[in-house]
Amino acid sequence: MARIVMKFGGATLASSAHIFEVAKKAIHEKEKGHDVVIVTAAMASSANELTKMARDLSDEASKRELDVLRSTSSQLSSALVAIALQEEGYNAVSLTGWQAGVQTDAMYVNARIDYVDVSRLEEHLAQKQIVVVAGEQGIDHLQNITTLGKGGAETAAVAIAAALDAERVDIFTNVDGVYTADPNHVNGAQKLKEISYNEMLELSNLGTHILHPRAVELAKKFQIPVIIRSNEIDTVGTLLKEEVEMEKNLIVRGVAYESDVIRLTVGYDAYSDASLADIFTVLANHRINVDIIVQAIIDGLKPTVSFTILKEEFAEALRVLEESKLSLGFSFADFEVGLAKVSIIGSGMASNPGVAARMFDRLRHEDIPVKMVSTSEIKVSVVVPQDDMIHAANALHAEFNLEQALYM
Amino acid sequence: MARIVMKFGGATLASSAHIFEVAKKAIHEKEKGHDVVIVTAAMASSANELTKMARDLSDEASKRELDVLRSTSSQLSSALVAIALQEEGYNAVSLTGWQAGVQTDAMYVNARIDYVDVSRLEEHLAQKQIVVVAGEQGIDHLQNITTLGKGGAETAAVAIAAALDAERVDIFTNVDGVYTADPNHVNGAQKLKEISYNEMLELSNLGTHILHPRAVELAKKFQIPVIIRSNEIDTVGTLLKEEVEMEKNLIVRGVAYESDVIRLTVGYDAYSDASLADIFTVLANHRINVDIIVQAIIDGLKPTVSFTILKEEFAEALRVLEESKLSLGFSFADFEVGLAKVSIIGSGMASNPGVAARMFDRLRHEDIPVKMVSTSEIKVSVVVPQDDMIHAANALHAEFNLEQALYM
């Protein structure tokens, strides 16, 4: 007997039929003798409706109240799943974030989990109940309701699994696993049997929106195996774990890309380490995700720093920079839109020099201009014009023979 | 500076425009320097939708999960009102039932308030915030979410007012006060300036659905003045308090009626006090409201007991009786539908004998058959055919000269 945490996304909860499907999957595990905890995301339709309601009242509704509103959405889905389980004859109980002991910081709309007090969860499991947790929410130290922002439900699922010492987390989503690249746009993309946390971290950071990096990080930290699987078809999925058996020692294991990237450039009259740190501190304090950072200090030119952010955070980033212009001490800010990021990922890269060079060479060969570059031990990212994104992804997928990955 | 609790019903929260209207009313009191606590009911549309969602999954969804579902509705309205207040430039915060300290018993769907721990409410008021409480919910001693059933939000409003030692509760509703009878159906019905708790208790028990008797009882117990007033027009409303100034010493102060009454009759082979108590205990345990009870023990006939219940509780009452038939020991059960209850209410009645006789006389004169009778110190109720209900109400309104009540 093991403990399994199963996370279901908004699309898997879209109708009564879907909800019974979710119940069936949970019952399948329960019947094997496992303790089962389900974590539900918000139902997509209800979340949108709530946002509209708030927007009708105010363009700048307070984030605290938005969380009170939005948390009703996963509370709702958790109760509905519990009702479906009961209808199937199983003992089930729904818990809100605070009831499930999901303790967070006080950053409304985008809260981080501090810890999970599983005492109540343990009580229900001891009573052989299937527990359904409203996944996108928690409570701060002053007992205010918080929501967890993007990837909240899957992050909560991993956090709960860690706190419960669960055997694994199953993430049910609208894809049946992790692929070497997006099969809708890249020819010959293959599903991976396994992928390491580090590779997945790069992949999820790089725009493969299957599992949020927060969840991957947490899974890595607590070494919780995670399976990405389809809600619709019953296939094996992709197992996410620490070390991957490399049947074929491919250097690159995946190509990822992300559109709607914006490059912001900030210039200074004189170079100062302090001000540079400050700018990213200010942006981080506003939870604006800065991605690739390139700093240029060239003799005779004013020092500049360029970084990429996502389109949806652009307005907020501009606002923050404008507000802090004086204290940050920069003299000008500039931006470029219509960009995309394309990346290659693979643990084998670290021990294989020349991968980046091969990537740049191929892109030049394809006449795709590279605007920015960023590298880590296991990935290389380039910023290219958005119009070249799919072209670049296909070229790189072919360049590194990923069509031969065949269920690695 | 005083403390005011303002309760808004579902109809007053139906749209963004309505919600801003609610905010305006609260701001009006705030600007006078008062501490303001708003208590919101569920938005009608959302409550119905939630019930439908549950019903799509199960005909017998567990009451615990129904409460998790339904509580989202007033949580939602409280957040929206807080957002509207903030948009108007006021410091406001929404609280769920458990955050507001509304502690209840564990009777899901129909929970009773045990006490209100106002410590958090006091903190927010001390910070000069307008506090918006989700009114139809609380939490039981095991930290499960409960909802308060019918009249929940107004009962919560009165309970919170009592615990906060508030000056008064304003109940904003779709009528502008309490009338001697329903002005839509009874000629010459007059609005009352004041009404005593006891009279209101009889009125609200008797189908004038302005304020639930639970709320009136609580207001009486803690001597909290309550004003029933219109959400739409700015009039004085009716003040509910302990003693009413009787400018005109009318014996009867109001005529109330209620349709869709069902008479259930249960017969026994032999008389037994115990079984009689049992039947009402069983019904009460299922929170089925039994109203008029008439017991007939006539020599030579089998003992019977008749009682009235509302149509909506009929199915449940039959189910409960059927289930408990053996233990309750009755030999047959019978029912009559298509009935209504008509009542006259007035504190002056106690010191004026012959009021009931005058009522029966008038009904006989109008050819309206009386099926059951029930009396208290300050009211007389009769059960009549539903088709005669409005006719009876008009006749009694005229009989006791209530068209002269003229804003008593």
Image: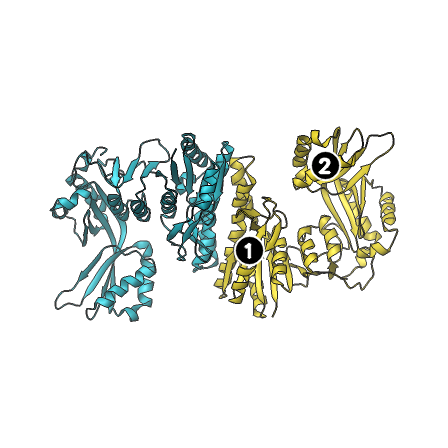
Chain colours: A yellow, B cyan
Q: Amino acid at mark 1?
A: Gly
The quadrant of the rendering that contains the N terminus of chain B is: top left
Mark 2 surroundings within 10 Å by alpha-carbon count, few (fewer than 14), some (14 through 19), many (20 or more): many
Q: Name the spot of residue A12 as percent of width and height, x first.
A: 59, 55
Q: Nearer the viewer, residue A291 or A46?
A: A291
Disc 1 crowd, CA 10 A, few/some/many (<14, 14-19, 20+)? some
Q: Can the viewer see residue A334?
A: yes
Q: Secondary structure at mark 2?
A: helix
Residue A7, position as x, y percentages in the image = 60, 57
Amino acid marked by disc 2 = Ile
Determine if residue A135 is in view: no
Front residue of this view, candidates B191 and B51:
B191
Chain at tag 1: A
Quote the CA–CA distance across marks 1 and 2. 35 Å
Left or right: B83 in relation to B200? right
Q: Which residue is mark 2?
A: A279
| Nearest to N terminus: mark 1 or mark 2 | 1
What residue would you read off at disc 1?
A101
Q: Secondary structure at mark 1?
A: loop
